[in-house]
Amino acid sequence: MDEARDQGGPAGFRLARIGDLRELEGGTYWPQLQPHFAHPQFRTLRYRLDGAARGVEAAGRPVAVRGASGIGGIEVAYIADRLAARMTIEQDGIPGYCLTAISRGSLAFSGGAGVRDVAAVDDRVGLIYRGTPGTILAAAAAHERTALWIGAGSLGQRLAALLDGPIGQEVVFDPVFAWDTPHGQGLRRLLRLMQEELAGPLPFAGSEIASRSFADLLLYTLLHAAQHSHSRHLLRPTPTATPGIIRRAEDFIRAHLEAPIALHDIAQAAGCSVRSLQIGFRRFRDTTPLAAIRQARLAAARDALAQAGAGDTVTTIALRFGFTHPGRFAAAYRAAFGEAPQATRRQAGRDRR
């Protein structure tokens, strides 16, 4: 993120560079972030400078930078403060969860009644909290973080799919979790990929298949990475999907190769929970559902390349099946089929002559 600091904010974000302290505390910068964070609920986020920082002039530099973007239905914020600042959620709060990754500095977290306060949150841990009124994040000077706002319904839907039933009570997270666990490392890799995509001219090449699949994977990974009120239920034994269930799942995947596929959609169509689906694919196919989706889409792309018409390119066919990065697609294709996609495409052209 050093480049982001030098340029005043990360690439791919709508940015508000704030030099007037009244603009920061009054929230008048919000329109600069649209179309992201357009819902009025986000106006309940209020910033105040800590007492020791009040009266400090901007001296020609932004005192704060706010950025906004979004991916797969998730609102993504960038926050950088030169001076110590306190964020408070006021009024009715925000009906969602905020996943926060700190890249510079530290903050103290207070989540209100029933939630553990954390005196020091830094880049060694992730922070996840509900947007309840009274929540406070007090950041030290020279602070930088990225925050993902996730709808409570989206998270609850995926947890219910993992548990194969309604969750009853909302998810309550232990606010901090380590990045150095296997699931924590996986989540951090996804956040890096997200930043790379958002920095490009068109995240995931504008593919709804890719962006929604990414968001789906991120939420499932978060539910395993962070401890919450239902974590112990995820450790309970679950029935393994039978071969018949796996075949139904594969039929569903093949029927939706050109559309976004969420794990809970596959599990529902197959008649099992997401956990059972994952265990069944490992047991009977020696793979994961996500890898099975990827392999099925690669096979479909190969069939399309073998039948390509004059106007069909490798790139357009790859995008059709959710492969947005040409280099990664070519590498995966060669690993799967032993030849480059261009070779399959050229052979199709020779066969037509």
Image (spheres, rainbow, N blue to C red):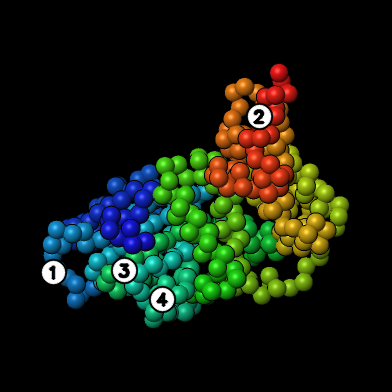
Judge from the rendering whether residue 163 lies leftward or rightward of residue 32; answer left or right: right
Determine which residue is flagged by label 3. 143
Badge 3: residue crowd in 10 Å (few <14, some 14–19, many ≥20):
many
Badge 4 or badge 2: first in the primary sequence: 4
The percent position of residue 130, horizontal first and vertical second, equals 47, 66
Determine which residue is flagged by label 4. 121
Q: Secondary structure at mark 3?
A: strand
Q: CA distance from mark 1 to mark 4?
A: 27 Å
Determine which residue is flagged by label 2. 346
Badge 2 or badge 3: first in the primary sequence: 3
Between tags 2 and 1, which lies in front? 2
Judge from the rendering whether residue 153 lies leftward or rightward of residue 102; answer left or right: right
Badge 2 or badge 1: first in the primary sequence: 1
Between tags 2 and 3, which lies in front? 2
Residue occupying image coordinates x 71% and y 20%: 352
| Residue 55 marker | 1
The percent position of residue 273, horizontal first and vertical second, equals 74, 59
When the figure is inspected, residue 192 is found, relative to residue 199, above or below; the finding is: below
Do residues under tags 1 and 4 come within 8 Å of each other at their CB atoms? no
Between tags 1 and 4, which lies in front? 4
Query: Callout 4, which amino acid?
Result: Val
The percent position of residue 161, horizontal first and vertical second, equals 68, 58
Q: Nearer the viewer, residue 7 or 262?
A: 7
| Residue 254 marker | none
